[in-house]
């Protein structure tokens, strides 16, 4: 690899280097050294007056590679196509190298926006994505988005800068050292980063490259932090970099485990509970359901993996979920439930005991720490396996001719509301129109933000394909989809839609980023001039006096102020045309919908769960909350 350098240009002392493996024998040019004076000392033949041979840098410096360039090359080699971030002085060399690579570099308005975008770009393409930040606040700003990435199971690599060793402890600008920023968890592997390290010397890179290849080839998420001291970024690599090998073998279960499963599933009727971790096995799930007549339900993130218009589909569980699931569990209880790729966390079930069938669970997950944990007292047959591999093996043992007569099952309640009968726009009518225009009328990825948007969209939209619907449950940060929609639209080079509250929309300014790169993101803002999930939740808990109001914002002006387009909707009659306009827009577009804040969002299951907990509680003062995602 032959590159030109602007700083620390290496002078080759050994021209016999192997450019394909980045091996070179070099000394580093001191950028402050006056090479012109040195040149003046030489005679016309390039000899110094005293007869000594001197190598000096020329306009075309010798080939070698700096740490910054090696990192950019390594990332490309690992299959990364896009990097989102915010540049800064401490990472100038890395930024330069990223920009000069084949990666597409999107600079954002806030590092959390960059991280959320990267997470959603990952889910839109299944390809790891880079986030880049400068030192100090650049790193801390990115943390929420990366935490969300860890919670969601994304593959994201944070490349940051930190203070060079010689400057640490001397109050450097944005000093990033043990004296200024907590190290544990930010610069070390642990709960936030699967792998984190500081590149202290260039020759660490080959082993880092190996580790990244191993981590990225594993199933599930992988969140990385590589921080590179400013001074190290321009040093040169002398050790060859390995070729990245991203091949991997999938974890699967034994023949005996599969036989045991078949035995358990054939003892009586069973249900299938589909989570986000099963998104790669949509076809197998459908085959199993149709072959066995099983009822199928899903977590909020699992929407669309099993088509929501299928007669065997009984609804979403948990936050924003459907009463039809509860009805099924009460009236046609299965003997067992086959759980596929969900941790059964609070947003998926509120650990509601009504979801535990008499024969318990068969719980399949790639993560061995998952099965049985959410319902520790329920009988659970745990299986560690890739979901697709497990189902393929299972299907081999479940005969085609099995009696698959499906009884009539409860299906998610249909919306009965008539448009045009209200002064203000009701969220139900808006969601109905989104279903027609965006879900059925396009292939856009549809995302719903934390807040009432989550529950309205999860409850009312009907998705018929995997990888079409996104909500964040684990971390549930406001601002995730507001910024994430840019990552999804950019990565797939097509439309992505975020349904968001006005509070969430005001959390960041990434519309401006979408304008710069003409990314066709669409935001539909449920504008009710309040944190309505909080307001409605406080009312539900019987608490008074908390003020959740926010001044009404004109998001069309916001859009135009940033160079995007937008339209305001104040009546139900205008919704459809506005949505069509947003869909047709080649660039970023905001639909600002003034909605009726009095419509109660469908958090019913959650509320019932809370009431039930309260009823059964001990004299110990209980914790109260409402659906704060
Ligand atoms: C970063 C972050 N801060 C706070 C919360 C808690 N929270 C959940 S919903 C919500 C209000 C959302 O308001 P808005 O975006 O306007 O949506 P609405 O519920 O009004 O539709 C808040 C503050 C959160 N989920 N994330």
Image: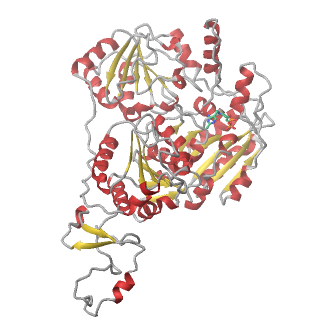
Residue 420 appears in the picture as rendered: yes
Q: Nearer the viewer, residue 394 or 375?
A: 375
Q: Nearer the viewer, residue 207 or 249?
A: 207
Q: Nearer the viewer, residue 581 or 607?
A: 607
**In which quadrant of the rendered image does the N terminus lie?**
bottom left
Q: Position of residue 592 (x, y in %)?
A: 71, 46
Q: Position of residue 312 (x, y in %)?
A: 46, 22
Residue depicted at 74% across the width and 49% down the height: 568
Q: Horizontally, is 55 left or right of 316 in the view? A: left
- As drawn, 361 above or below 246: above
Residue depicted at 24% across the width and 66% down the height: 24
Q: Horizontally, is 140 left or right of 555 in the view? A: left
Residue depicted at 70% across the width and 42% down the height: 502
Q: Position of residue 46 (x, y in %)?
A: 26, 88
Quadrant of the displayed image that contains ligand 1: top right
Q: Horizontally, is 506 left or right of 310 in the view? A: right
- As drawn, 567 above or below 347: below
Residue 444 appears in the picture as rendered: no
């Amino acid at each position: 690899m032959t590159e030109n350098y602007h700083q620390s240009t290496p002078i080759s002392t050994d021209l016999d280097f192997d450019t394909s493996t980045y091996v070179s024998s070099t000394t580093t040019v001191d950028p402050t050294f006056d090479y012109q004076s040195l040149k003046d000392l030489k005679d016309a033949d390039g000899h110094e007056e005293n007869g000594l041979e001197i190598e000096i840098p020329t306009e075309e410096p010798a080939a070698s590679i700096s740490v910054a360039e090696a990192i950019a090359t390594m990332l490309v080699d690992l299959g990364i196509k896009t990097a989102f971030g915010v540049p800064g002085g401490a990472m100038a060399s890395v930024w330069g190298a990223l920009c000069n690579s084949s990666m597409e570099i999107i600079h954002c308005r806030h590092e959390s926006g960059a991280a959320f975008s990267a997470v959603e770009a990952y889910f839109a393409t299944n390809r790891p994505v880079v986030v880049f930040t400068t030192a100090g606040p650049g790193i801390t700003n990115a943390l929420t988005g990366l935490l969300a990435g860890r919670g969601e199971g994304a593959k994201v690599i944070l490349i940051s800068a930190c203070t060079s060793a010689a400057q640490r402890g001397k109050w450097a600008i944005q000093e990033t050292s043990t004296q200024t920023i907590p190290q544990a968890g930010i610069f070390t592997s642990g709960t936030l980063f699967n792998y984190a390290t500081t590149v202290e010397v260039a020759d660490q890179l080959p082993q880092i490259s190996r580790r990244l290849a191993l981590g990225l080839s594993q199933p599930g998420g992988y969140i990385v932090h590589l921080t590179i001291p400013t001074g190290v970024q321009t040093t040169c690599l002398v050790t060859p970099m390995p070729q990245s090998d991203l091949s991997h073998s999938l974890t699967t279960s034994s023949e005996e485990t599969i036989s045991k499963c078949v035995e358990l599933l054939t003892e009586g009727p069973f249900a299938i509970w589909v989570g986000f971790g099963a998104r790669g096995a949509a076809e197998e799930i459908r085959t199993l359901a149709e072959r066995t007549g099983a009822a199928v339900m899903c977590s909020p993130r699992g929407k669309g993996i099993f088509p929501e218009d299928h007669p065997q589909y009984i609804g979403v569980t948990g936050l924003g979920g459907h009463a039809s699931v509860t009805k099924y569990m009460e009236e046609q209880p299965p003997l067992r439930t086959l759980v596929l790729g969900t941790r059964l966390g609070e947003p998926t079930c509120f650990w509601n005991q009504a979801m535990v069938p008499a024969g318990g669970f068969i719980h399949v997950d790639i993560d061995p720490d998952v099965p049985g944990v959410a319902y520790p007292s329920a009988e659970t047959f745990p299986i560690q396996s890739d979901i697709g591999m497990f189902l393929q093996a299972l299907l081999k043992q479940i005969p085609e001719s099995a009696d698959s007569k499906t009884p009539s099952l409860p299906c998610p309640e249909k919306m009965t509301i008539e448009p045009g009968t209200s002064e203000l726009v009701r969220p139900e009518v808006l969601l109905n129109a989104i279903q027609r225009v965006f879900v059925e009328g396009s292939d856009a990825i549809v995302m719903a933000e934390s807040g009432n948007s989550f529950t309205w969209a999860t409850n009312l939209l009907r998705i018929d394909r995997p990888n079409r619907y996104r909500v964040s449950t684990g971390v549930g940060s406001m601002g995730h989809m507001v910024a994430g929609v840019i990552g999804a639209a950019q990565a797939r080079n097509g439309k992505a839609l975020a349904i968001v509250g006005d509070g969430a929309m005001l959390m960041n300014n990434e519309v401006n980023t979408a304008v710069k790169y003409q990314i066709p993101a669409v935001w539909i803002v449920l504008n009710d001039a309040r944190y309505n999930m909080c307001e409605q939740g406080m009312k539900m808990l019987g608490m008074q006096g908390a003020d959740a109001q926010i001044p009404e914002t004109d998001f069309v002006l916001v859009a135009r102020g940033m160079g995007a387009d937008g339209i305001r909707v104040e009546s139900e009659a205008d919704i459809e045309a506005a949505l069509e306009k947003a869909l047709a827009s080649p660039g970023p577009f905001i639909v600002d919908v003034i909605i009726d804040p009095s419509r109660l969002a469908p958090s019913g299951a959650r509320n019932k769960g809370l009431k039930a907990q309260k009823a059964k509680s001990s004299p110990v003062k209980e914790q109260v909350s409402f659906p704060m995602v």
